[in-house]
Image (spheres, rainbow, N blue to C red):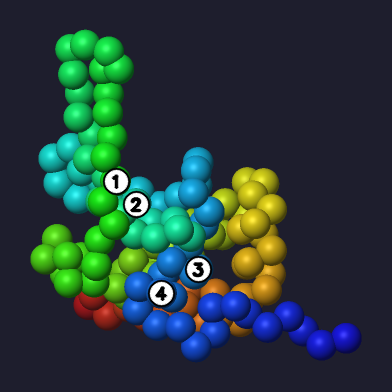
Amino acid sequence: MSPLKCRCEGLSGLDLVRCLAPPPGDYEVSLEAGRGRELIINSEGVYLRSVVSDDYLPFIRTADLRVSGEALRTLGFDLESLLCEAVKGLLNASQHGSQAASEKAAECTDLVNSVLESCAKQRVSTNV
């Protein structure tokens, strides 16, 4: 029996971030992106979510806008850091009961481990 081939092999940039991200929902990655805004990373894409509070129903509204690599750079995010966060989110989701995340993490074990190793090196080099 041959090992599973990772569906994310050969991808790069935002495509790789999206592919290795957790599914939408409770364990999607959420990063602060300024006042009232969050950067959301899940398997459907990378979004800028604006949260607006009102004094009337429905009280809180959200709006999601898909962002490009250029917009991410403008916001001060780099793809390497986003890839690290996506993989951490995938592993967190798989450890907390997400079947889709567990299957993807198992299928892409070598790639996930490679990304985590790169993240550790990146963290060490920025702390020096």
Residue 64 is marked as 1
Disc 4/disc 2 C-alpha distance (Å): 15 Å
Disc 4 or 1, which lies upstream in sequence? Answer: 4
Disc 4 or 2, which lies upstream in sequence? Answer: 4
Residue 125 vertical position relative to residue 81 in the rendered view, above or below = below
Q: In terms of image quadrants, where is residue 86?
A: bottom left
Q: Give the structural element (helix, strand or loop) at label 2.
A: strand
Identify which amino acid the numbered label 2 is placed on: Ile
Residue 15 is marked as 4
Residue 60 is situated, as x and y percent measured from the top left of the image, at 27, 24
> Circles 2 and 1: CB distance less than 8 Å?
yes
- Between circles 1 and 3, the one closer to the viewer is 1
Q: In terms of image quadrants, where is residue 57?
A: top left
Q: Is 62 placed left or right of 52 in the picture?
A: right
Q: Is residue 45 visible?
A: yes
Q: Which residue is drawn at 24% across and 67% down?
A: 68
Disc 4/disc 3 C-alpha distance (Å): 9 Å
- Between circles 2 and 1, the one closer to the viewer is 1
Disc 3/disc 2 C-alpha distance (Å): 14 Å
The residue that label 3 is drawn on is: 20
Work out whether residue 57 or residue 40 is closer to the camera in this orientation and state it: 57
> Circles 4 and 3: CB distance less than 8 Å?
no
Q: Residues within 10 Å of mark 4 (few under 14, many from 20)?
A: some
